[in-house]
Amino acid sequence: MTLFEELKWRGLIKDVTSPDLEEKLNKGGMTFYIGTDPTADSLHIGHYSSFLISKRLALHGHHPILLVGGATGRIGDPRPSSEREMKSNEEIEHNIKGLTAQAKSIFGFEVVNNYDWSKDINFIDFLRDYGKYFSLNYMLDKDIIKRRLETGITYTEFSYMIMQALDFLHLYETKNCTLQVAGSDQWGNITAGVDLIRKKTGEEVYAFTMPLITDEHGVKVSKSEGGKTMWLDKNKTSPYELYQYFINADDTKVIEYLKVFTFLSKEEIDSLEESVKNEPEKRLAQKTLAYEVVKDLHGEEEAIKARKTSEEVFTKGYSEEGMLEENITLTDNMNLMDLLVTIKIAPSKSEARRLITGNGISINSNKEVNPEFKITEELFKDKVIISKGKKTHIKVNLVK
């Protein structure tokens, strides 16, 4: 299938500014950009679904530019309900450095910062050279502006559209950038850029948006069920946490996610879709999705490790990866109560007895209900994992 057909099949095109874009995308050779504001020092999984478009287009001969909004980030795009809290210049600079390094590392493409060409524009030039091309009626007709008029919108937020349009114009004039790609919530801003270039230069440029990716509850993808953001920085979200996020994908969404988040072929995804229908208990689609995402972001070694840890947790209730360890010396007639006190699972022998008789203690995933269970050297011929419930697991090493 052609590039445009593939993007449509994957559900990655919502709106286009011109029917001519299909042929241009299929032909290749366009310079395009996609951007994000520095609201944090790491991208999250919601950005990843959008930014992957840069890899897909690059594979078909297009040239990507990734824009970090050092200027627009100081303003903040209008949210549907209220104004964004402005961040300090120091925090913005910190976030820009983090995002720039991350974008280069993950995607490997050219990264630009719109603060570089916006910082020296004075207010009079801004109004004369750009503001005059935007009628008030045109701006008020944009969906996001309409919604905010009900609660009130500041002039600062109102100006964001012009600043983003200025970015497209600058990249068109300096890098022959003729395409902007964005999430569907940015449609009003990116069409403003297309219109500005047409009015100032008489030339036609293009844009398309991607649908926002949501979970089975209609919530934008980027956070786990507990509200924790899924960052692309593995120091913020470990590869294992990311793997678990995707392996828990709902059956109703997993095929959509495979199309959006992976480079698997149509044939491979169709096969996984059959598995979801006929053998959902195997969760083969979810396992493939989780593995492919972690592999693309953090490498095959991390993906294999995350998969192994996940399988261990599923079969044993715990993983030895990063597990707490305690070293002990055997004493005469040591029993399980003594051991629990020694490794600090229980503060006293009476509490240890209560845990054991209450089915709260396991040795290597096997429940032990005898408080007088003898701890001998024979037990340590293999590894010994003591578990309290489902969350506390300690590897016990014998020191002679």
Image (cartoon, grey):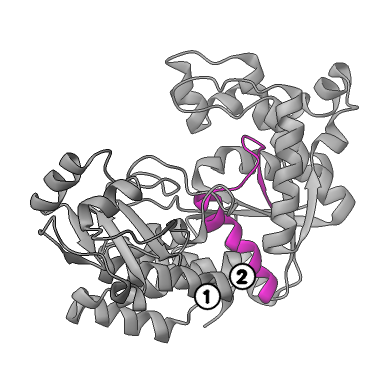
Q: Is residue 10 visible?
A: no
Q: Which residue is mark 2?
A: 56
- In the picture provided, is 204 more to the left or to the right than 126? left
Secondary structure of the residue carrying tag 1 is: loop
Q: Amino acid at mark 2?
A: Arg
Q: Position of residue 172 (x, y in %)?
A: 81, 50
- Answer with mark 2 or mark 1, whichever residue precedes in sequence: 2
Q: Amino acid at mark 1?
A: Phe
Residue shown at the point (56%, 41%) measured from the top left: 186
Q: Does residue 85 belong to the magenta stretch?
A: no
Q: Which residues are magenta?
A: 34-59
Q: Which residue is mark 1?
A: 263
Label 2 packing within 10 angstroms: few (<14), some (14-19), many (20+): some
Residue shown at the point (87%, 49%) measured from the top left: 173
Q: Of the residues tagged 2 and 1, which is closer to the observer?
A: 1
- Residue lying farthest to the front in this orientation: 332
Label 1 packing within 10 angstroms: few (<14), some (14-19), many (20+): some
The image quadrant where one finds the C terminus is bottom left
Front position in the image: 372 or 240 = 372
| Distance between the alpha carbons at the discs numbered 2 and 1 | 8 Å
Cβ atoms at labels 2 and 1 below 8 Å apart? yes
Q: Position of residue 188 (x, y in %)?
A: 57, 38
Q: Is residue 158 visible?
A: yes
Checking the image for residue 82, the label placed there is: none
Residue shown at the point (15%, 63%) measured from the top left: 367
